[in-house]
């Protein structure tokens, strides 16, 4: 299936629209909803966690018994269990190579990074928020968690691939995910890190009963709706 739309080049969608069997939502609207979480992220990290909330890894990279096909198959990424509708974020800045329905992957966004020799894949989405050729910044919302394609329930299938002489090779994303979740949790626990500050009170004020840090914004919570 090819990407189809009847709008003008570069047109922004004010609300969710259907393009054939592909649903597009406004990335601007979603970015506004998770702005606090983006503010909480320290900039210039090589990778950030691909979800707007902490989420457990439900299936690792490597050989596994496929839960649907019931045969041993290689799992080329890692799965993150999360509720349907959870915002999916670009782990790095890059250009959208694919935003479409890809068989067992379901609704999928593929981003190309750097010189185009690295890519990240985000699969089983319920909705996509970007179009092929579009440039996205690190932390931008590119879609929503879903369970499309060959899937047993809502989750994000996340892959990282490297272009080699043999073509695209899937890499184990576990270090990226572990680093990303640790950074996200750390910043959520101490939001002032996002501003390059430790978030500590003045020692004299800290001794006062009931003293607290006066944050310049309301810290986003992992379970915020």
Image (spheres, helix red, strand yellow):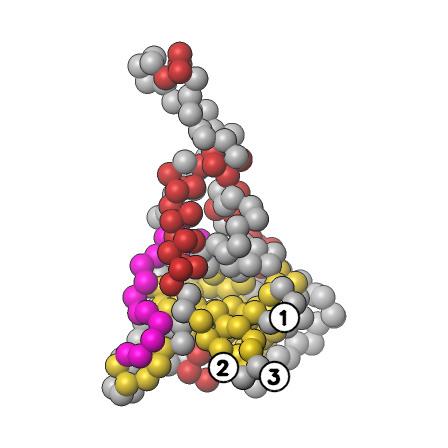
Vertical placement of residue 168 versus 95, above or below: below
Between 217 and 177, the one nearer to me in the picture: 177
Q: Nearer the viewer, residue 18 or 92?
A: 92
Residue that label 2 marks: 102
Percent x, y of residue 82: 35, 61
**Res. 71 in view:** yes
In the image, 160 versus 155, the foreground residue is 160
**Residue at 60% across / 71% down in the picture?**
117
Q: Residue at x 37, y 56 (%)?
A: 178
The magenta stretch spans residue 57: yes
Give the magenta-colored segment's residue range: 51-64
Helix, strand or loop for disc 3: loop
Tag shown at residue 2: 3
Disc with the residue nearer the chain's start (3 vs 2): 3
Q: Compute the Cα span from label 1 to label 3.
A: 21 Å
Q: Element under label 2? A: loop
Sequence-first disc among 2 and 1: 2
Nearer to us: label 1 or label 3: 1
Residue displayed at 46% across by 84% down: 103
Q: Residues within 10 Å of mark 2 (few under 14, many from 20)?
A: some
**64 lies left or right of 89:** left
Q: CA distance from mark 2 to mark 1?
A: 20 Å
Left of 73 or right of it: where is 196? right
Tag 3 or tag 1, which sits nearer the N-term?
Answer: 3
Query: Mark 1 sits on what residue?
Result: 116
> From mark 3 to mark 2, how far is it between C-alphas?
10 Å
- Residue 153, located in which quarter of the rendered image? bottom left
Q: Quadrant of the N terminus?
A: bottom right
* Vertical comparison of 35 with 167: above or below: above
């Amino acid at each position: 299936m090819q990407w189809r739309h009847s709008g003008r080049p570069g047109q922004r969608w004010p609300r969710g629209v259907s393009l054939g069997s592909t649903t597009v939502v406004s990335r601007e609207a979603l970015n506004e909803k998770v702005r606090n979480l983006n503010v909480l992220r320290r900039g210039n990290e090589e990778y950030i966690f691909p979800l707007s909330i902490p989420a457990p890894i439900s299936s690792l990279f490597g050989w596994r018994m496929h839960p649907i096909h019931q045969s041993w198959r290689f799992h080329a990424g890692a799965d993150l269990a999360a509720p349907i509708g959870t915002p999916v974020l670009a782990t790095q800045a890059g250009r959208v190579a694919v935003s479409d329905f890809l068989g067992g992957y379901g609704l999928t966004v593929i981003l190309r990074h750097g010189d185009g020799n690295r890519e990240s894949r985000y699969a089983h989405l319920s909705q996509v928020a970007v179009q092929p050729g579009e440039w996205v910044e690190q932390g931008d919302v590119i879609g929503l968690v879903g369970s499309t394609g060959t899937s047993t329930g809502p989750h994000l299938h996340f892959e990282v691939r490297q272009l080699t002489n043999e073509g695209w090779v899937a890499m184990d994303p576990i270090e990226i995910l572990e680093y990303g979740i640790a950074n996200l949790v750390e910043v959520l626990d101490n939001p002032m890190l996002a501003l390059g500050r430790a978030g500590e009170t003045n020692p004299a004020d800290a001794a006062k009963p009931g003293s607290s840090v006066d944050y310049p914004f309301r810290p986003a919570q992992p379970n915020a709706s």
